[in-house]
Amino acid sequence: MRISIFTQVQRLFLAAMLGLMAAASAHAKPDAHGAPDQFVLQAATEALDALKSDTKVKSGDLAHINKVVDTYILPYVDFRKTTQLAAGRYWRQATPEQRNALADAFRGTLIRTYSGALTDVTPSTTIKLLPFRGDPNADDVVVRSLITQSNGQPVGVDYRLEKDPQQGWRIYDLNVEGIWLIQNYRNQFAQQIDQSGIDGLIKALNQRNQ
């Protein structure tokens, strides 16, 4: 399994979300029904503002970091859709109870990973939104960006978003240098399910979340 790649993807994703602050000229509340690229920008700005002013995050309080991530980042991610796509054909085989349990376990995994990645974000992290190529009237789009940190070359990160009629835009996948997050998880999920079933995957995720 590509655990190291997965970890790097998650860390770069968080850096992208938080680093957007450097490109923002205003502190607007995220407009989930507006332009998708501006929605990503606004959501990240809100998150970074909160983190910069929170001394408990800077001190490494993991319980508090979990709360901040849960409040300012995860609401803009469609966990259930990400889980469904990562589970692939196994999602159709799962009972409603298993689907809920898997989505909750996967959500815990994302929170845990994001929390650990916060320590890698620095004031020098910056992001540049690339020109939007999609149809602004489409319901499924990709927002492209370049992330730059002081100790490395720019990294391309693409966010895939879907627009819900009620909730508006929500992020459900991302691509870091050619690696799609859902595809990487799908491989890991399939291996675990083949070995121990859907309940085995749920158990494994929950054990890692402890």
Image (cartoon, grey):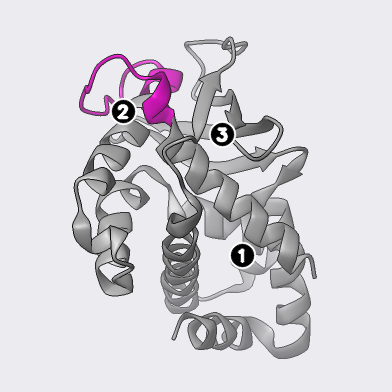
Q: Amino acid at mark 3?
A: Tyr
Q: Magenta segment, which residues?
A: 20-40
Furthest-front residue in this view:
151
Q: Which mark is residue 128?
A: none
The answer to whether mark 2 and mark 1 are in CB contact below 8 A is no
Left or right, 57 with respect to 183, comes to left
Which residue is tagged 3? 159
Q: Quadrant of the N terminus?
A: bottom right
Q: Is residue 36 above or below residue 112?
A: above
Q: Secondary structure at mark 1?
A: helix
Query: In this orientation, does residue 16 appear?
Result: yes
Which residue is tagged 2? 32
Residue drawn 57% across and 74% down?
94
Label 2: few (<14), some (14–19) or many (≥20) C-alpha neighbours in 10 Å? many
Q: Amino acid at mark 2?
A: Ala
Which residue is tagged 1? 92
